Each structure stands twice: as structure tokens, then as C-alpha cells.
Image (tube, helix red, strand yellow):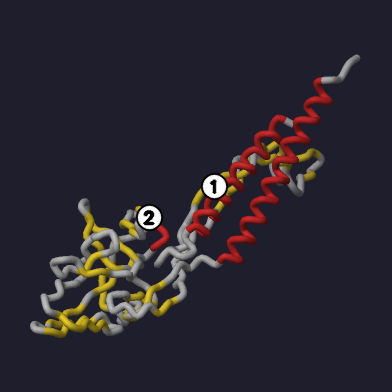
Amino acid sequence: MIRALYSAATGMQAQQKTLEVVANNLANVNTTGFKRNRAEFQDLLYQTDRASGAEQGNSKIAPSGIQIGHGSRLVSTPKLFTTGELTSTGDKFNVAITGDGFFEVTLPNGKGYTRDGALKIDATGNWVTSDGQQLGGGFQAIPPGTTDVSIAADGTVTAKGAQSITFKVTLTRFANPAGLTALGNNLYTETPASGAAETGNANENGFGGLAQYYLEMSNVKVVDEMVNMIVAQRAYEVNSKAVQSADEMMGLANGLRR
């Protein structure tokens, strides 16, 4: 009965973590380029009272064993990098990635990566994120007096005006994007789990293309998250009932008299 208490408690903790993941997904349903998380669990160690295939005497072998589990635990909350819905904005500095890839961002302590294509131009003509972080990956400053900017699907940027320039930007991808570390502010950083950053041209060798005047929205689906929330709530209730039942059984055992 003591084991039942602790096993059910781990189940309650697991469902609480599930609810926290779902809540974060729902909170970011309108966040540009956001990728939803999924909670993944494993069962804990087992107490083996009899191993499967154990000798039972008279040349008999136990067809199955006796194992008592100790509950569950959260092991991973990977991000699912499926493409979100594209929304037309009419802003020439909004660029969505239609497929695999990230924009490179220059950070004070290294490089970051983002799917947020709500780009801006700062006072010096540099391409920056909404937080003012400058973009790398071949982005060049726009000359003063520029009247029009066009971005092709293959990453070719043409700025027309008093001084016209053309340059090509690149995208970055990873063998395991789920291994990236999320920094917040729609930014990710490379880790040993993600693999080394691979740079390439848009619309080539499996890299996604660029869509000017569009933004990639969150890939969170409210209906799916609501279902996950209800399932987590019901599982939490069932585990709490197991705690209550184990407590009542312990109370009965403690109340026994000769």
C-alpha cells in the first residue's frame, strides 16, 4: 500500500507536467513561428519478485514473472517542428520559411536561430528581429533611399532605390531540431543533441523556400490541446483516487484490533 501511494503520486506529478506543457502551448497559439511541445514519459524501475522463465521445480518454468512498477516520470518535452499555417500580412519585411530551415541570428554570446520571419530594418538599415537582434546568414544592410525590397523564394533579395543592391541569404538546418535549446523570444541555440548547423540556399537540397509578405504562425492546434488537457485532468483525478484508496486501506490496517 505504501508503494501504491508513491506510484500514484508520480502519476499525479506526471499529469501536472503534461498540463504545464499544454498550458504553454495554448499560451503561444498566436506566437509567430512557435513550435508546440509534447510531453513524453517512461515507467520507473520494477521490483521483480519472480523473473519470467524462472525454474519452478519438476522441470517447470514460469511462463511469466511477477513485477511491480513504481510509477512514471517525465523524460522529454521535444518540440515538434511541423510547419505552421502561413498568414498574409502585406508587410514586405515579413518572410515565412516554407519548409525546413531557420534564420540565423547574431547574439552577444554566439549564434541563435529562429523561425520568426517578422523582420525589421533598424536605423542603420540592418535586418533585425523584433528584439533588435541582427540577422546573419548573408543579410546585408539596406542602403538609404531604398524604395522597394523584394525577396525571392530562393533567398535572392533585391533592394531598389538611389543605390540598388542584390544579395542572397541562406538558411540553417539541423539533423535533430528537437535537440535545440529554446531560449525564449522565438530563439534557439545549437546543442550536441541537435547536431552541427548546416547552411544552404533556400529551395535547394531540401531547404525550405522563402515567402515574402507572409508569416508562419504557431503549429499549435487548440482542439488537440484541449483534448490533451482533458485527458491529463482525468488521469490526475484517477491517480488522486488511487492515493485516497491506498490511504483508506492503510487506515483500515492500522485500525485492526485483536
Name which quarter of the figure residue 254 lies in. top right
Percent x, y of residue 172: 29, 69
Q: In the image, is 122 to the left or to the right of 73?
A: left
Across the whole image, how many numbered discs are drawn on residues?
2
Element on which disc 1 rests: strand
The first of marks 1 and 2 along the sequence is: 1
Looking at the rendered image, the quarter that the N terminus falls into is top right
What label sits on residue 74 in the rendered view? 1
Q: Residue at x 29, y 68 (%)?
A: 103
How many neighbours does mark 1 have within 10 angstroms: few (below 14), some (14-19), or many (20 or more)?
some
What label sits on residue 182 in the rendered view? 2
Residue type at mark 2 is: Ala
Q: Nearer the viewer, residue 184 or 66?
A: 184
Element on which disc 2 rests: strand
What label sits on residue 212 in the rendered view? none
Percent x, y of residue 23: 54, 54
Name which quarter of the figure residue 178 lies in. bottom left
Q: In the image, is 247 to the left or to the right of 33?
A: right
Q: In the image, is 199 to the left or to the right of 30?
A: left
Q: Nearer the viewer, residue 16 or 170?
A: 16
165 lies above or below 176: below
Q: Residue at x 21, y 51 (%)?
A: 109
The answer to whether residue 77 shows anywhere in this view is: yes
Q: CA distance from mark 1 to mark 2?
A: 18 Å
Residue type at mark 1 is: Leu
Percent x, y of residue 127: 21, 69
Name which quarter of the figure residue 5 lies in. top right
